Amino acid sequence: MRTGIFLSYAGGFREAADQVVEFEKIGVDIALVAEAYSYDAISQLGYLAAKTSTIELGTGVVPIYPRTPTLLGMTAAGLDYVSDGRFRLGIGTSGPQVMEGFHGVPFDAPLGRTREVVEICRQVWRREKISYDGKHYQIPLPEGRGTGLGKPLRLINHPVRERIPITIAALGPKNVELTAEIAEGWQPVFYYPEKADAVWGDALRAGSAKRDPELGPLDVMVSASLAIGENLEDRLAWAKPQLALYIGGMGARGQNFYHKLATRYGFGAVADHIQDLFLAGKKQEAIDAVPDELVRNTSLVGPRGFVKERLAAYAEAGVTTMLVHPLASDDREAVAFVEELVSLTS
């Protein structure tokens, strides 16, 4: 199992970049930068590329709606170049709250747009003249749109690789099926290994049946909070604010992917309660309502032996890359937790 670090989008990036240098030294395989509605992930990854030399770097994730498919392809090729072939493009749809509320673009046709974005990016990296007549993207613009002066163009530069790995963040069955069909990697969130097959197994198998063998096995990249050691049970509470935010506040009633996931895990009534509290402005009560069982089984928090058992459960469920957020009191403790994780997965 590979190990990775998931950098927060909440400030302090220069310090986090120095930490990534330390993680590279102890053998961490990959570092991902999130975006949401924070600083953009791309500029930060350029900075990381200059500070590191061996660790794989990726977006975790950038939404497909604000950038054109060709811009995503160009950007990925550029980051792959400055990192000497160490970049992985992580994409996702995010949700209507962010796309329409922050970017001002419609949240429509997530499945169709994702497929077309992937196909166009791969045309860019193969240095083909971009000619694409999809349902959602037409390049060049067809007659009757624009000036009529557009013509097919290819990327000027020669990319380091003609196929940069693509990871898709997906939770719903149709999105997961599409990911298993067309992407090199899948990035779910709040992954509960014992319940994963019941939630996603059919979708993964359906997508895998249509998968091009040249893509290789699907890299299942799962994120989890991390704290390894004795007497760290209190760290479970540190992970609850994120769960409360996502289950309760990331989206509206009936349009919250994380609430739906918690419901599919069997926590429907609790998810409803968390959402009611969060949307009523009672954020601390929403945090307190997050059950220990959900946190414990979607995290790596506890003594070394317990974490080793949980890693075995993740591996049994098909996880190939473990991305972690250290629940640490300082940088030194964070590095120590991650170093212990690397030793357990080696």
Image (cartoon, rainbow, N blue to C red):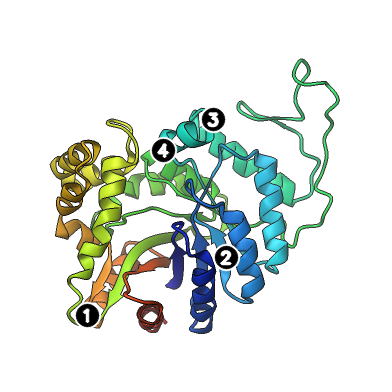
Label 2 secondary element:
strand
Q: Position of residue 35 (x, y in %)?
A: 50, 51
| Residue depicted at x 20% and y 63% | 237
C-alpha span from label 4 to label 3: 22 Å
> Label 3: which residue?
105
| Residue depicted at x 72% and y 57% | 78
Label 3 secondary element:
loop
Asked whether residue 209 is in view, the answer is no
| Residue depicted at x 76% and y 58% | 159
> Label 4: which residue?
174
* Mark with earlier residue (2, 4): 2
The quarter of the picture where residue 261 lies is top left
C-alpha span from label 3 to label 2: 28 Å
Tell me the kind of residue under disc 2.
Answer: Leu
Label 4 secondary element:
helix
* Mark with earlier residue (4, 3): 3
Disc 4 crowd, CA 10 A, few/some/many (<14, 14-19, 20+): some
